[in-house]
Amino acid sequence: MTRFLKITIAKCKRSLGLGIYVLGFASLLGSVNVSAADFWSLDWFEKDAPIEVTVNDAFINVHNAPGRGYPIFHVVERGETITLLKMHTDWIKIKTARGIEGWIKRKDVLLTLGPDGIAPEFADSKQADYLTDRFELGTAFGDFDGAQSFNVNLGYRFTKNLSAEVRLAQNTGQYSDSQILAFAILHQPFPDLRISPFIGIGAGTLKTMPSTTLVQAEDREDQLLQASIGAYIHITGRFFLRAEYANDYVLTSRNTNQEVNEWKLGFNIFF
Amino acid sequence: METRVQHILLAASLLSALTCFSTSVFAADEKEKNNDGELGKIITPDIERRHIKEADLDSEDFEVGLYTGVLNVEDFGSNMVAGVSFSYHITEDFFAQVNYGTSKTEKTSYELLSGGVELLTKDQRDLSYYNISLGYDFLPGQVYLSEKWHFNTSVYLVAGAGNTNFADKNYFTYNLGAGFKFYATDWLMLDLSMRNYSFEHELFGIAKKINNPESRLGISIFF
């Protein structure tokens, strides 16, 4: 491949302007070619280097299962080297030099030192660690103008105060069902509060599907503007409850626009 | 003559000693710089001084599972249900779960007794549901099968909401349930649970709130 490229480049060098152009392209191709070779030579089943840390506290308790109530059956002492195997919620599975396996609390890993002599970098379960550069995925249930609504939202938090999200809702009513797809921007003035209020504005489409029992009703699609106010309530770690009231303004094709009140309660998880 | 020879020899020996010394000093300098000598090999540790971050460690907080069981749809008989579940373990106590299941319903007693009456078409008898639920592991524990074997278990409560698609219509559905988890290994789990789905329909002309219990057995893996 490279040889072929070299020949091509040599040929193209005759016309200088084009030559430079092709050279750039060829080098790009060449680099792709090399990385492709690396890609194929990757050993997918190769074991990662073990993550070894040294205990830097008087001792760390080792539980026999990942849960606060499970018995402590072993203790690792200062200076002992342990291998971190995997993480499950707030627990880390470890293996001692003697081959004993057990679970330590996730925050206890901060009482160890990595090979570079620095404690491993782990976000602790405080709210502040989940406020920036995070994706959030949530669900909520509530009321949309008398219809029962089921919502899913996927958001990204740019700064502590500002996040953007995509919302999907399925509303199930007595006379009609509807679906909402909207995009919204949320602002949290006091993100550090445990109960942190937010305001948001959004826009999207509302698709209404009247019940088949009604005579000659047709599906229709309208634009929708949303203004919402609500609060995030921090429960633990990455887990937040979210309550929201939204005022929806449906831009209908009829003579008058429609105003809809919507409230919902759900939970959001930060990644 | 003798002294002259001695002088030459002395000068030569001095010169050689000097060069020898200077080269050895130079060599020692080199060794100190590069740690290349025998001693350097022993002292310099051959380990990677890596910094450990959270992302380096494999986390097993997601769970995907298959389940099958019996779903009783009020007035429409008890039938086999099969579904998939996807969970995220938020903390050691809470998990969020998405479920999707499908089932086929039977004819109502009225349809069977009346002979020819058909309330629903064949396709309308298909039922599917989805929901998002929040689970709470409120009784974590262990079972001891022998001197050697112990397994983690948990009794949990789960509640949520979603939609049921039945007879060409969506019905907003609440679900409430409880179950028992048995962890065969850290990453393989058996799940025996009961759920109740309740929604309101008007298939018989008037609004009727129905409860549909489901008992199911599932198997999940963590990743």
Image (cartoon, coloured by chain):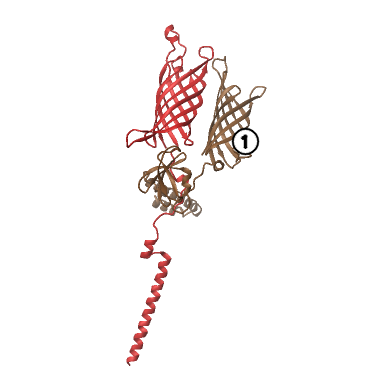
Q: Is residue A2 left or right of residue A231?
A: left
Q: Categorize mark 1 by other alpha carbons within 10 Å: few (<14), some (14-19), many (20+).
A: many
Residue lying furthest top:
B114
Judging by the rendered image, the residue that carries numbered circle 1 is A198
Residue visible at 48% across and 28% down? B158
Q: Colour of chain B?
A: red
Q: Nearer the viewer, residue B99 or B149?
A: B149
Q: Quadrant of residue A219?
A: top right
- Residue lying at the far bottom in this picture: please name it: B1
Label 1 secondary element = strand
Say if residue A33 shows up in the picture. Answer: no
Q: Is residue A55 visible?
A: yes
Please provide percent x and percent y for residue B98: 47, 30
Q: Name above or below for residue B97 compared with residue A80.
A: above
Amino acid under disc 1: Phe
Q: Is residue B169 left or right of residue B30?
A: right
Callout 1: chain = A
Q: In the displayed structure, does residue A84 sit left or right of residue A251?
A: left
What hue does chain A carry in this figure?
A: brown
Determine the image quadrant of residue A213: top right
The answer to which of B19 and A3 lies nearer the viewer is B19
Residue A37 x %, y %: 39, 48
